[in-house]
Amino acid sequence: MLKVVVFDSGYGGEFLADKIEEELPVIGIIRVIDWRNANKILTSPKEARRIAREDLRPYIGKVDLIIFANHLLTVTSLKYFQRKFKDQKFIGLGLRKPKAPVKDSTIILTTKAVTKTISYYNFILHLSHKSKTMTLDSWPEKIDDGELTFTEISDTLKGLVDRSVSSQEIFLFCSQFYDIKSELTKLFGNTIKIHDGFDDMIREICRILKIRGGMKKLK
């Protein structure tokens, strides 16, 4: 069985690992979730890279693929790991540009550290429509602890709900936020388009590991 490590600092990594197992049951997932250093990994690119190197040392060169389930680590350090450990395959959750031009009201939910990266600046430049970014640094920990309520989500984002447009689009640039997609749909309505990069990651995993048939067809 193919061995794949999912590295993260909280429930976002657990959620992503669960979804990969569901879609690609031929893969054996090894979860490396560093809850103890969650704040450093979410806020400091330098510390995130150092911690990732230490945590992943037992697996580098010994597994088929390592996945960074952390946007900040991906956009600031993925290329470093790929250059440093050329015999190990790495992928991550980057700031994936939409395949088609975004024409609707655009909302980006992320953390402050991500917005300070060159990758985020380039992503914003790529959007053809005016966007609104919300940095929600307290939410990842609340999601990890099961304390983020729909009321708080609604109270925080209600000013962004625009019923005058036929559709809105949301980009999630924090893997913990993947767990609140149903709440976002409830708040914004069924016409909301939510981009989380998961399907792109599944396709990338299949390409790198040469998995044919794709996703649930492998069961």
Image (cartoon, rainbow, N blue to C red):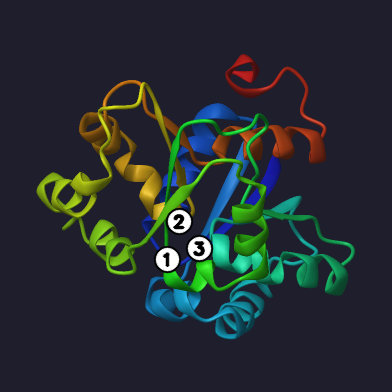
Pick the front one: 102 or 199: 102
Q: Secondary structure at mark 2?
A: loop
Asked if one can make out residue 44 in the rendered structure from this viewpoint, the answer is yes
The answer to whether mark 2 and mark 1 are in CB contact below 8 A is yes
Q: Residue at x 28, y 45 (%)?
A: 160
Disc 3: which residue: 8
Q: Distance from label 1 to label 3 (Cα)? A: 15 Å
Label 2, label 1: how far apart the Cα atoms are:
7 Å
Instruction: Tell me if residue 89 comes above or below residue 141 in the rendering.
Output: above
Disc 2: which residue = 174
Tell me the amino acid under the disc marked 3: Asp
Q: Position of residue 37 (x, y in %)?
A: 43, 79
Q: Which residue is mark 1?
A: 111
Disc 2 packing (10 Å; few <14; some 14–19; many ≥20): many
Q: Looking at the rendering, which quadrant does residue 89 occupy?
A: bottom right
Q: Which class describes the residues within 10 Å of circle 3: few (<14), some (14-19), or many (20+)?
A: many
Kind of residue sitting beneath label 2:
Cys
Q: Position of residue 63 (x, y in %)?
A: 74, 55
Q: Is residue 167 left or right of residue 93?
A: left
